[in-house]
Image (cartoon, grey):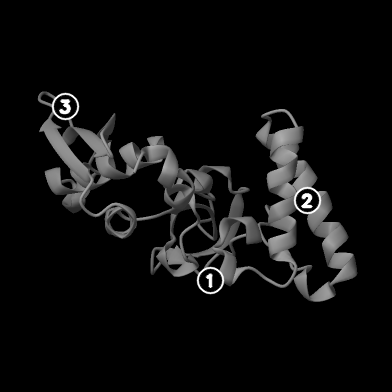
């Protein structure tokens, strides 16, 4: 088995319940937040265990002299290695363990694991500052969900997007624009699929 044999499975969207949300920015009145989607290190490990349980490894090396705990991680899958730096957050969570988890996730992105989350449209949500959490969980668009979670017609939309990927320039903004038009067209044919997934403020 080679890396190319499992690439598509590695890159597949995660179930929505495994996708977490954290604020990338909070409005001055602290009532709205720009939400960023992410997965945790355990989801990455589970994905690797499910696809190639005996053919992956992860190593870390502590980076000295940094303000926050920092490590260099190396993820190897089926003999192919990718490296990246992981940094711990500020405060009580600032541990080497947190830095290692960050490094694993960053290395995994090099293999396409969770990379699609970077392509999500910007989403502002009502923010509960007391709970330090969004008032409601943001929606994921159909293309960012596994097949079994997509709305009726969503699979056809994703298939169309895959075809357009080979016919359009590698311009994500252009692809998103086409996606919006396709989604609107699909919504006019099937009103139940025409919800405002991924609406940005």
| Left or right placement of residue 94 versus residue 193 in this view | left
| Residue 31 place in picture, x, y as percent | 54, 61
| Residue 126 place in picture, x, y as percent | 57, 64
Circles 3 and 2, Cβ within 8 Å, touching? The answer is no
Q: Mark 1 sits on what residue? A: 136
Q: Nearer the viewer, mark 3 or mark 2?
A: 2
Q: Nearer the viewer, mark 1 or mark 2?
A: 2
Q: Residue at x 25, y 37 (%)?
A: 76
Q: Is residue 63 shown to the viewer in this render? A: yes
Between 55 and 167, the one lying in front of the other is: 55
Above/below status of 23 relative to 99: below
**Of callouts 1 and 2, the N-terminal one:** 1
Checking the image for residue 66, the label placed there is: 3
Q: Is residue 112 shown to the viewer in this render? A: no
| Residue 135 place in picture, x, y as percent | 51, 70
| Left or right placement of residue 59 versus residue 124 in this view | left
**Of callouts 1 and 3, the N-terminal one:** 3
Tell me the CA gap for discs 1 and 2: 23 Å
Q: Mark 2 sits on what residue? A: 180
Between 197 and 27, the one lying in front of the other is: 197
């Amino acid at each position: 088995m080679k890396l190319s044999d499992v690439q598509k499975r590695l890159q597949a969207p995660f179930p929505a319940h495994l996708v977490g949300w954290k604020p990338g920015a909070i409005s001055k009145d602290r009532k709205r937040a720009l939400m960023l989607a992410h997965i945790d290190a355990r989801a990455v490990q589970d994905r690797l265990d499910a696809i190639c349980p005996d053919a992956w490894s992860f190593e870390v090396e502590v980076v000295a002299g940094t303000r926050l705990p920092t490590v260099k991680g190396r993820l190897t899958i089926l003999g192919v290695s990718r490296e990246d730096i992981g940094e711990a957050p500020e405060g009580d969570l600032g541990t080497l363990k947190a830095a290692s988890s960050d490094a694993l996730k960053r290395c995994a992105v090099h293999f396409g694991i969770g990379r699609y989350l970077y392509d999500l449209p910007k989403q502002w949500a009502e923010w509960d500052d007391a709970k330090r959490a969004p008032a409601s969980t943001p929606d994921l668009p159909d293309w960012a969900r596994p097949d079994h979670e997509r709305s009726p017609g969503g699979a056809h939309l994703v298939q169309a997007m895959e075809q357009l990927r080979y016919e359009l320039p590698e311009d994500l903004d252009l692809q998103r624009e086409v996606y919006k038009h396709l989604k609107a067209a699909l919504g006019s044919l099937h009103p139940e699929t025409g919800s405002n997934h991924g609406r940005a403020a």
